[in-house]
Image (spheres, coloured by chain):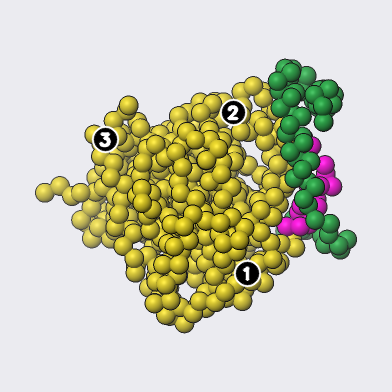
Chain colours: A green, B yellow
Amino acid sequence: MTPTDAKRMADGIGLTDFPPEDLARLATLAANTDAQIAKLPLLAKPVAPANVFRVPTSPR
Amino acid sequence: MPQNLDNLTIAEAARRIESDALSPVALVEAVLARIAALDGRLHGYITVTATAALEAARAAEADIKAGRRRGKLHGIPYALKDNYDTRGIRTTASSRLMLDNVPARDATLHARLQAAGAILLGKLSTWEFGTGLGERQNDLPFPEPRNPWDTARFAGGSSTGAGVAVAAGMALAALGSDTGGSVRVPAAACGTVGLKPTYGRLSVAGILPNTYSLDYPGPLTWSVEDTALILQATAGHDPLDPTTVDRPVPDYSADLERGVKGLKLGVIRRFHARDIPAAPEISDAFETALAVLRGLGAELVECDVPHSVQDYRLCVRLIGQPESLSIHEIDLRERHREMGKALREKLMGSLFVRASDYIRATRWRREMAEATDLAIAACDAVICAATMLPVPRYDDEPATIEYMAASATSVFNVSGHPALVQCMGFDGRGLPLSWQIVGRYFDEATVLRVASAYEAATPWRGRRPSLSAKEAAPT
């Protein structure tokens, strides 16, 4: 991600006051996050999330 | 002749209070005096509630004298990480965003300790909202805590003040919170006991969140017996926290003296031998500590899990980051200049985690938790490393980040198992070395039993930081 891409991303989420050094840092952090995500394994489709919604007991 | 009240454990103080050999007022006065003498340099506390603590101590003393003693925690002083809500007392999470935050209610665990008659001393330093990877926290509104064993050394995080206060005798117990090791790493760095219980055992209601699915409250104390006492008073279902589990709370002190003879204890070596090679002093101390348990009659068996420390840390990161962003997104947009660098950069990095990546990480969590439980459930308890490097200087940021990364604590935030950190000796610089004892789901009792047997067989609890009021004068 280039600083220009980072600025577009920051603007898109309302971070409009980031100076150039913060945008450069944002680009670095984005690259780091992408590298981490690339390490996530592929999982079989039936593997559901750990924190699925549970229905509580209705009060009587 | 005046009693020396420095460094009393809860159990010892409770015995003296029960036999009328110690007054809660004298105890609270002694601990407040220690805070006044030491905390100018250690910086464990953000807020000290001295007046209210003394008032509560006088009330406790009157109740006890009138035969209305509520139990072992009546009159015992404790402190809270400053992300626990305390009615009428500022709760900052060490953040400029929260400097004016005065909660209207108490966190459930604080309310339970109050109901047991324990006495709040104040609020303890934390990394901002419990977030960080070991970065310097010198851009927050409060000073960085220092390690009581050597004030030039790192004290871990994020429940930093909790580790510092308990190790320095500035609280008999503290409650912290743990998303990837934030109770257990400060416990390791400061040489205390630190417990992250089973997910759902302790309520998070009224604790400012770091994440929504990885946060665990937990106690830090000097002794294993004290951890059992705090857990006893705080455990159990809470209608205000739907993640708490409605199941009976056992007597956590009942088995503390049963020893480990006949227990089958798994030993996981991969974390410190394969994934992150530990410093030789730590792996040597680990083997020596195992020999103690073997000598006490435990059966030690090799045990393994199919994932690396790095896998568990990645899972915590990719679940924790987007959950944190969900908590702080509006503040990131509108007040990011008031945030410390660690929180701000974590949130900035979180912007790039897609929803499907987050969900994939939570699916991976399920698979990892099941695989971890297969290993642990085959034993009565499991032993593994906690932190794998010597405690670094507090101002050496690359080293403090490396120290945090070289820990096997996040494993059990992912899996949900109870995990206790305990001192297993000291390195050549006199800094604590620690290991982890891990149990089956909701079997904190066996974890405490193993830890208690080890504690009783070793001399480590007899050694305290050598700080004196003179040494601790502000520099």
Query: Residue at 37% across / 37% down in the picture?
Result: B151
Question: In front of the other: label 3 or label 2?
Answer: 3
Q: Is residue B32 left or right of residue A1?
A: left
User: What x and y, as percent, mark residue B197?
Assistant: 55, 59
Report the quarter where the C terminus of chain B lies.
top left
Question: In front of the other: label 3 or label 1?
Answer: 1
Q: Which residues are magenta?
A: B352-365
Disc 3 to disc 2, C-alpha distance: 31 Å
Q: Is residue B161 left or right of residue B351?
A: left
Q: Which mark is residue B304?
A: 1
- Which SS class for mark 2? loop
**Most extreme residue toward the front, as rendered?**
B280
User: What x and y, as percent, mark residue A29?
Assistant: 73, 34
Disc 1 to disc 2, C-alpha distance: 39 Å
Assess whether residue B124 is covered by the magenta stretch.
no
Report if residue B25 is visible in the image: no
Q: Which mark is residue B471?
A: 3
Of mark 3 and mark 2, the one earlier in the sequence is: 2
- Which SS class for mark 3? loop
Residue identifier under label 2: B340
